[in-house]
Amino acid sequence: MLGRRPSGRAAEPHSTRLGSGEVTELDDDARDDAEPSPPARVAAGSARKGRPTMADVARAAGISTALVSIVIRGVPGASDETRRRVLQIADELGYVPDQRAQKLRRSSSRVLGVVFELQQPFHGDLVEHIYAAAARHGYEAVISAVAPSREESTAVNALLRERCEAAILLGSRLPDEELERLARRLPALLVARRSGLPGVGSVRGDDVMGIQLAVDHLIGLGHRRIAHIDGAGAPGSSDRRLGFLQGMADHGLADYADVLAGGLTEEAGAEGVRYLLDRQAPPPTAVIAFNDRTATGVLDVLAQRGRAVPGEISVVGYDDSRLAKMPHVQLTTVSQDAAGMADAAVTAALDLIKGGTPQETVLTPRLVVRATTGPAPR
Amino acid sequence: MLGRRPSGRAAEPHSTRLGSGEVTELDDDARDDAEPSPPARVAAGSARKGRPTMADVARAAGISTALVSIVIRGVPGASDETRRRVLQIADELGYVPDQRAQKLRRSSSRVLGVVFELQQPFHGDLVEHIYAAAARHGYEAVISAVAPSREESTAVNALLRERCEAAILLGSRLPDEELERLARRLPALLVARRSGLPGVGSVRGDDVMGIQLAVDHLIGLGHRRIAHIDGAGAPGSSDRRLGFLQGMADHGLADYADVLAGGLTEEAGAEGVRYLLDRQAPPPTAVIAFNDRTATGVLDVLAQRGRAVPGEISVVGYDDSRLAKMPHVQLTTVSQDAAGMADAAVTAALDLIKGGTPQETVLTPRLVVRATTGPAPR
DNA sequence: CTTCCCGACTAGAACGTACTAGTTTTCGGG
DNA sequence: CCCGAAAACTAGTACGTTCTAGTCGGGAAG
């Protein structure tokens, strides 16, 4: 094993950093203004110096900023000739409207804030569709991430300062008290979480029913011993747990129901199924996981242990996220219909902004049968 | 199988939407201003009406907005008594500084723009650390996502309008031409991608060396037939391919090297390894995947096919993302050190903002040996 | 030849904050 | 009691837009 040295293709090995310790802080800051002659003064050269403003464009075109504004916004009030000229000059100068100033001036910012979890595939799906849904309504979505090292309240505060018109929280874990404080400041909407609060709207799937669909499906395939690896304290987990127990009871199989504390990560699923396989009692013939990530963990462990899926054990996930759809996974799962949910969330948020009363919108889930469920083994 | 109906616990079954078709657009918009008497006029009631401003706080406290500004920013210039009082009133009123106005006023917006891919775990890791690194330097990170339905140029434009001081692009796929246009507008920095452009900085791992580390490791374990499932056209993939071929050649094993067109998804890895297993020639004893996601796809297929890892086949990933660290996966991988890379990226971006020349910073990767590699089978 | 209107364009006031350049108050020392 | 200086506070402008309320020509209608 030869000790590797940095590859030769890079100009310099490590952290290269050229020249001069100090750079002139602000080179030619003060530039005299009353001088209309040379139109293109910014154009060439590097990206230095504050970006061009509307005033720069106006000066270069020899017109007022108001007229430039009219052209840029594309509203009536300018001749075609001027329009053409202004747009060309703006492009030459590399002018981009300053969003801060726009938003400040405009009565409504037309911005929806979205808080999501960085590593949750389903949240990724939702965010993607929220972008689209917001755009469809002439809104912009600005996103703020939650991660192990970034608390939800930090993420929310960032949005608050952004002065968005409403906040959409994906699978929030904020305590009721904080949610109430938030709702007092701006319209707030929970997604994929039940809202017990009067001031807070909510868009979510019917979790009880979703799991029941899964249970029905499995029992229809002849399964009896079914386990549920739940979401611990996560939003929705108690509903899903309830749906599981109720679904089993409906078929008179309450005694065969098995609920394990889980979580919403792959590891939680892995741990849960490991326990099921290693314990004294015979393992279940089917597992319903809290979500797709959890189910993925279950699948991984089963594969490692050489248990056939669905031959020996069937597995059902929840969310129908990107994970479930992957061709080599083909997870049977309960679809939350990310697009529909995003759509409903944006619509509901817009309704709140217009002064509507907070509602609880419950979407009907759908079972998507793929390759991880099959007839119960003999 | 009994046809499931919406669960009884939800107040109303589907898409509930209460009352009044139309809501008053803007209720009591005009409110007379010159009236200093009742201090707390916003406080109670719902969240309606524009949020309180500095002027509201000042009026309630009977002082000037300038002084409120001083207190809010926490700069010297106000008595402790006033400070306390103002903060309390601000809190009561639910005052939050308007970021748009702040940024507009402040010379520098102290905002870094970050473009990332929503479904790439490694990007998630990077974003998380960039948030932290930026905060450490008194900057804020605003993120803009790329997804199948949201183009990179859309994401970049959103940042541009946000007037951030620099743009950090994670694993960008933008063509050189567009990058140049961008760099002419504001300092731009590529992460995990080589920059051929003079005006664009770059922070990346030494991909050639990274793969070579993996090759060395495998050969040290006795492997000879090694395959590389590459990243197709993705940033960094040509370097990694080169590193693979060169590493194999260094050991005189050029003839045993096998390069497959892949991609950066699980499916690409799954497809690649399926091909390797199904073809005529004997399968390799080790696979180096383009990244962790690709490696995960490989692992899944191997598990499905009942191939022992690392007993029969060893697998190496790249990135050391969240995926690799998961307890039930324990993927051997080349670490890009997300934290270090995020740190370097933020530092480099700040340097660019201060007028520094764009640099190419190359970080030394590190091999993290976990459970998916072992001695070559007999 | 007026009058009026309409399109093209402009002046200037917001929006909510930061900050410079004051002005007033406080207070200790002589 | 007054001076001076620091501390506490304020007026007013600037940031880059949008938008209201205009001005200015010029052509059609009277």
Image (spheres, coloured by chain):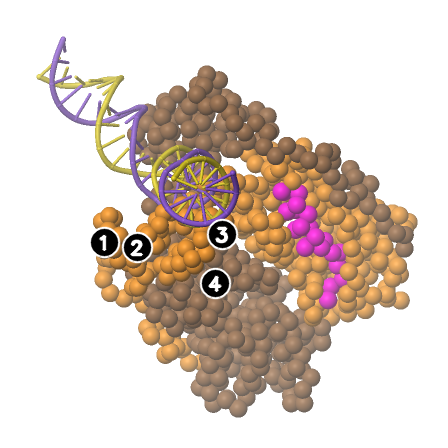
Chain colours: A orange, B brown, C yellow, D purple
Q: Mostly what secondary structure, the magenta segment?
A: helix
Helix, strand or loop status at disc 2: loop
Q: Are the residues under badges 2 and 1 in a single subunit?
A: yes
Q: Are the two marked residues, 2 and 1, in contact with CB atoms closer than 8 angstroms?
A: yes
Q: Is residue A297 magenta?
A: no
What is the distance, in whole Å, between disc 3 and disc 4 at their CAs? 33 Å
Q: Which of label 3 and label 1 is nearer to you? A: 3
Chain letter of the residue carrying label 4: B
Q: Amino acid at mark 4?
A: Leu
The residue nearer to you, when weighing B157 against B304, is B157
Crowding around mark 3 (Cα neighbors within 10 Å: few <14, some 14 to 19, many 20+) is few
Report the residue marked by disc 3: A74
Q: Amino acid at mark 1?
A: Asp
| Vertical position of residue B119 compared to residue B264: above or below | above
Q: Which residues are magenta?
A: A330-350
Q: Which of label 2 and label 4 is nearer to you? A: 2
